[in-house]
Amino acid sequence: MANRPNVSLSRRRFSGAVAGAATASVFAPFHLRAAAKSPAKRKRVALITTIVRKFSHGQHFVDRLLEGYGWHGRHHESPLELVSLYVEQFPETDTSRERSKRHGVRLCPTIADALTLGTSRLAVDGVLIIGEHGDYPRDAKGQPLYPRFRFFKDVVKTFERTNATVPVFQDKHFAMDWREAQETYRDAQRLGFPLMAGSSLPVTWRIPAIEVPLGTPLVESVGVGYGHHGYYDIHTIETAQCMSERRAGGETGVKSVQAFKNEAVWKLLAERESTRRLCLAALNRSQTLKPAPGRTFAEPSIEHLQRVSPFAVAYVFEHLDGFRTTIFHFNGTGTAFSRDTAALNDFTYAGLTQSGDVLSTLMFLPMPPTMSTLASFFSPLVNHIERMVLTGQTSWPIERNYLTTGMTLFAVDSLYAAGAKLETPDLRIRYQPTPGPHFWLG
Amino acid sequence: MKPLRQLAFVLEDFALQTPAQQLLDRFLFGYRRNGGFHKLDGVRISIARAGDLQSPPAAALLQTRVNEANLQLADLPAAVRDADALVIVPRADSTAPSEAQVTAVLTHAKRGAPCFVFGALAENLAAARTFATLAAGRQITLAAGTFLPVTWRLPQVDLPTNAPVDEALIVVQGPSALAELHALDGLLPLLERRAGGERGVRQVKYLSGRELWRAGDRREWSWPLLSAALSRSDSPQGDAIVDGRTQDLVGLGLVPKLATNPRGWLLEHTDGVRTALLALDGVVADCNFAVRLRDGSEVSAQLFRAPAPAEEHFSPLAAAVEDFFRTGELPWPASRGLLTAGLLGACRQAAARPGTWLSTPELVSR
């Protein structure tokens, strides 16, 4: 009998072949556990988003839930059933209607309807809020006014009205306003539902595939990336924070934030030897640092950075235990951010231990359309969401995202205030990391 | 450690983003290694070029390097005569340097100087053996290969040492014979770790078009292994390009629809292990493998090609080559180079008689 798969047979046919992936299982205990326990009736989720079009965050999450994704050496079908979609904007390039029709997903007029499926009760087992992309104004500080908080509050109102809650995932940081972020955290605490959030950076591939051992005596972290403030800050901040939180004693919170721009960045690098050392160590993991003309790669140096990236931004975070995090964005030669003119297109990390050792890695994003046709780094994020909905447990503490939301928002405030140093008593957010590793290993 | 004072590069090309440029520049300017930027201080580099193979822009770029790094540009005998180590890099569209170049290098090089050939040592076993004999006669240690054996894998897996392998498959793209070279250089380093090591290949069969899919249906190669390999891809073609969707390319029956000029080489190894080298243009645009062990478990990964223009996968290759030069120890078994050359020839011969097993007794280890 031919064993070429067809549409109707493929999934059953291959299940036996992949079930014994012993080598992969070393790296994939969660995945195998989830697969083994996949109930006949899948848990149901609603997805609330701003827009679904090619390469929007909404599309990445929707398609992984509906179409599956490559995971640990097989095409993984989600154990979650996407039953409803609330989409706010429908451009000509919208794909939500086609996906809704082809997969029988209810396209809902309101968030409440997506959560109740037209009943008076909460009718889903989990909610994804993907408030990224779409046509939204910016605030005075240049941050996009994506309606994450409004979406979240509609979800909370439905929880309150139905007197029931389910796990919620919030893409990236909570909100563009600190009071809204505080309310988000407090609502989740008050109602007691699992809330997970964040960027894909902490969970994507690492090159090399290293983790900071729990309890490492780290004294300083540096994250290096690129991007417009308010959009990409969270990625670089979480690149660093997912490593920093593993230091001896865990996270103690942040007491001050200060932004630097252009000349002030070079002055900062000149004055702080350890930060300069870590910045260059991180850049030695970069695979995209812009080279000089006629070259294909560059040796990282401050002089080279000044040539290829006069447009630079840095954020310095002083933690309550004396730890320091510095984030650099080397945005290239323009005066406004553009990916095409940025001095690099990746996110790297370096951390310094008390004994002077440096740990460094690249958090690798195979970014479409230049490096891939898929944004595969969403796959581990979706997999963590699946685990949260299946188990009711978040993979990492929500306090990480509460803190990184605040770090992001206060950093932009400082940038907007011409680099004023801001005391941040609200960011005395203390937490312990979960063991992990949470990044893509298998 | 051997002294490395002078290094000779024999280049057939030097355009930006060619293997020649990526390798030479790393030895000239340094490269990323172990979290730092490593430079070869105090090493003089001489260059010999195959002039009639150079394009004008490549020649201009090479002249720029000569000027800025004070390189010595010489004819081949003069360039290699005093070198402590040698690198030969063919044109980007070639699997191996011209036989005349390799012969000349091995003839004129200093006795005992290690020599690295980017790509295959030769395009057939007879030539490879001739080079090996010539090199051995002059105590020259000879290694050949691409970046695929040393690049990062996503995930960073390897075949467990002495693993009992049942079957393996790799997906590549591109024209023959580069596709076969990439497939072999991607897969053989994994397979040689299996129980008993690599003992050669006893027959090879070429299939294309519908016959390739039918062979899969007949279980001559494994659709489930293809599914495992493709699950590691970041670059599925077709609908993913249209609207970004993730898809089960094998499960949805899309592979035969997407593939343009699909080609496959089936290898039966001496120990019974079966290998499929699939050149599937139009399906994915990256290099992915899957290996099934006898207990049914699988190992699969993407062989990572880092983004242009830096193509950082040349850095781990530069590190392997530099270590080879400094220690004199081969970065991988010399027999792999001979087998690769022999298989390139066998794949070419098999392609002339599609669907027929080509017996390859010369590729069986004794």
Image (cartoon, coloured by chain):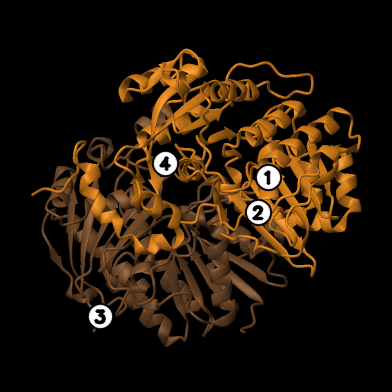
| Quarter in which the N terminus of chain B is drawn | bottom right
Residue underneath mark 1: A400
The residues bearing labels 4 and 1 have C-alpha atoms spaced at a distance of: 32 Å
- Badge 3 element: loop
Q: Who is closer to the viewer here, A86 or A305?
A: A86
In this rendering, the count of numbered labels is: 4
Q: Which chain did the image draw in orange?
A: A
Q: Amino acid at mark 2?
A: Pro
User: Which hue is chain B drawn in?
Assistant: brown
Q: Is residue A428 in view from this perspective?
A: yes
- Badge 1 element: helix
Q: Is residue B75 left or right of residue B146?
A: right
- Numbered label attached to residue B235: 4
On whether disc 2 and disc 1 are found on a single subunit, the reply is yes
Q: Who is closer to the viewer here, B279 or B108?
A: B279
The residues bearing labels 3 and 1 have C-alpha atoms spaced at a distance of: 57 Å
